[in-house]
Amino acid sequence: MAEKKITLNMITCRTIQQGVGMEAGKTSQKYFDACTVMHMHPEDMKKLGIWKNTNVKVTSSVGSVIVKAVETREDLVPGLAHIPMGPWANRIVPAYTFSTGEPCFKGFPVDVEIAANARIMGAVEVLQDACGLIRK
Amino acid sequence: MPKEVTDVICPFCGTLCDDLIVSVSDDNKTILGVKNACAIGAEKFNHQRQPGRVKRPRMRQADGSYKEITYDEAIDWTAKMLVKSRKTLMYGWASTSCQAMSIGHEIAEKCGAIVDNCATVCHGSSLIAIEDVGVPSCTLGEVKNRADRVVFWGCNPAHAHPRHMSRYSIFPRGFFTVKGHKGRKIYCVDCRYTDTAKCADEFIQVQQGFDYELLNAFRTAARGEALPDTVGGVPKEKIYEIVEDLKQARFGIIFFGMGLTHTMGRNHNIDIAINLTRDMNDFTKFAIMAMRGHWNVTGSGQVLGWQYGFPYAVDVSRRDQARHQTGETTSVDLLNRNEVEACFYIATDPGAHFPVDAMISSSRKPTVTIDPHINCTTEISDIHIPVALVGVEVGGCAYRMDNVPIETRKVVDPPEGVLTDEELLTRINKRVDELMAKGGA
């Protein structure tokens, strides 16, 4: 039985596609394609009731972001999810550093919901939107 | 006839590959192709010839659009911002040369700023641990020539340092490692089955966030003490078996990355990894090395280290002595607490790599970003000053992840009229001097 919302443990890491995209330019399609995905275990997709390549809304204690849920070639265990580092991942990374200077980039809980028709924002847009710099 | 520039240093990651061959057009302006580089390094060079590069400074208008301004105007604006602000965050430095850094630090001392580099969100935890317990390390050449047991713990060089494995850690044949890959035993400890794990002889899947416990269990096993049945999801038999094998090494090395520095425990994870290395030296020769990611971030640590005694997050805003306190002078904490009056970013993109709350705080302050390209940070800054690409369009000194300094090469000319980091910072420094002589901004 598919659930409406599932909770996963989130990690954000580098991928080579993200690295290539970053060097191609932060506003490039390569960067967008590499970083706007969430790697999920197929069992978690089943639990949420989605096919791969469905857009999802990921919410943490600090905010939420729309990304595309995909399967990964670097296997995860069920319950673990991964968004490549970048402005999308950082919309949900808690900034608290436990006095070490390092925010919690890996290992924080997130809620995942289906958002099949929601639009994924661009690299600059996702940051400007958070900073209130987009004039409507 | 296109010419080939050989022995070019790659300006992407901390591996600083020094065997790239770049073909350059006759007029010395365009890069035609790159050999030997990884996918990311090749993209860095190929990007140089893409159209649409910003060649003049830009200033944000009230309506959110950007207008082109001259270098003089941008330098004046930046110098005034620096002089006026009582506490400026000068963050970045990882993609520029050591020469440029030292000019930047001079400005920081004059204006009262905090100098921080990418280690703050990367290997900062490692640096805290190294300050606490020291580090038994080596150079990558020693790894290549001697290591027969290699442990990758919480790092994924297949993605982050793509040529690390072929140049130093898994595949190369060295003086005492003539069998290459066959003579080495590779372990990979990670919470997911990464592409690096696929190259390893043995993959140890640790539960996410249980690295400290597992490292502690390795230490316990090395001393022959009793263990619980499983630690961090790994059965005790496995732990004993691996530790016994590591003791058989002639030369062992642990490489660690963000899997340790970003998870719960932070510096304590590194602390215990270093202590495990120390313990293993009772049995054989063992070393440990941080997989430094962003190109010359090690160099920034070195320059700050020899000038002020601390490798990152150095507060010189009190103007009498340098201070460093993690959680207090680190960039993300400063921004979280709204403690700085202006932001000066150079050679990095915090907009893409800082948590959003820190960037929201940053976006409300006067901000100058110095970067060759448009990125997330430039688009929330008041001023964006484009510069030449260090390692491609201008040379300079950079440090490899094992603290070996390497002089990088200029391959092509920068676009007409674009300043280098060194030239730009020298001119900002001069303008700051003029303003201070007049008594302020």
Image: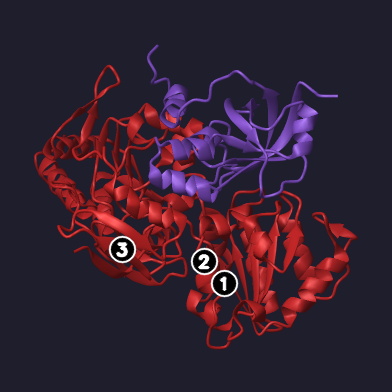
Chain colours: A purple, B red
Q: Is residue B33 left or right of residue B269?
A: left
Quadrant where the N terminus of chain B is found in the figure: bottom left
Answer left or right for B184 relative to B114. Answer: right
Disc 3 residue type? Val
- Residue B362 vs A11, above or below: the answer is above
Q: Does residue B308 appear anywhere in the picture? A: no
Task: Identify the residue position indicated by label 1 in the image.
Answer: B169
Residue denoted by label 3: B22
Same subunit: marks 1 and 2: yes
C-alpha separation, residue under disc 3 versus residue under disc 1: 25 Å
Contact check, label 2 and label 3, Cβ < 8 Å: no
Q: Percent from the top left, x then y, of residue B114?
A: 36, 46
Could you tell me if the residues under marks 1 and 2 are in contact, i.e. CB atoms within 8 Å?
yes
Q: Secondary structure at mark 2?
A: helix
At 38% from the left edge and 59% from the top edge, which residue is drawn? B296
Q: Is residue A31 above or below residue B393?
A: above
Can see residue B83?
Answer: yes
Q: Name the foreground residue: B212 vs B113.
A: B212
Q: CA distance from mark 1 to mark 2?
A: 6 Å
